[in-house]
Amino acid sequence: MPHAARGLTVGLFGGSFNPPHAGHALVAEIALRRLALDQLWWMVTPGNPLKSARELAPLAERIELSEKIARNPRMKVTAFEAAQHVRYTADTLALVKARNPGVDFVWIMG
């Protein structure tokens, strides 16, 4: 998980990013600017528990492609959910908040 110091505002941009594309990058860039975020974390999910994984590219591939498209140095790409064995947004948010006290998080949907 990327590091965030107390007092920072971090956007959490969750998705399968299958594949990541220019639209995702645009949403991330706009969120950074308009919401005055200090950082934006791409939370690449191992799989949506409500969707079939049959056509889902491997997580490592989606991470690599996301890193290529998330060029802003304030953007961090993470496989946090896979590392923590969580898939539901509520569980992800609870863990992220518990590990980063004093950080304000904003959920980004696009």
Image (tube, helix red, strand yellow):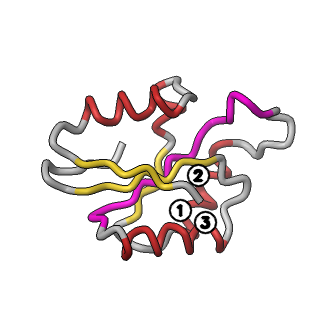
Residue 65, x across and y down, in percent: 63, 61
Residue displayed at 59% across by 40% down:
45
5 is higher (above) or lower (below) than 92:
below
Instruction: Identify the mark at residue 24; answer none if there is no mark.
Output: 3
Q: Is residue 48 left or right of residue 5?
A: right
Kindly check if marks 2 and 1 are in contact, taking CB atoms under 8 A apart as contact: yes
15 and 19: which is toward the camera: 15
Residue 15, x across and y down, in percent: 60, 48
**Marks 3 and 1, how far apart at CA:** 12 Å
Instruction: Identify the mark at residue 67; answer none if there is no mark.
Output: 1
Nearest to N terminus: mark 2 or mark 3 = 3
**Marks 2 and 3, how far apart at CA:** 13 Å
What is the secondary structure assignment of the residue under circle 3? Answer: helix
Is residue 72 located in the magenta-colored stretch of the structure?
A: no
58 is higher (above) or lower (below) than 7:
above
Kindly check if marks 3 and 1 are in contact, taking CB atoms under 8 A apart as contact: no
Indicate which label's residue lies in the foreground, 2 or 3: 3
Q: Residues within 10 Å of mark 3 (few under 14, many from 20)?
A: some
Q: Residues within 10 Å of mark 1 (few under 14, many from 20)?
A: some
Residue type at mark 3 is His
Residue located beneath label 2 in the image: 63
**Marks 2 and 1, how far apart at CA:** 6 Å
Report the span colored magenta: 37-51
What is the secondary structure assignment of the residue under circle 1? Answer: helix
Q: Quadrant of the N terminus?
A: top left
Main SS, magenta residues: loop
Residue type at mark 1 is Glu
- Marker count (numbered): 3
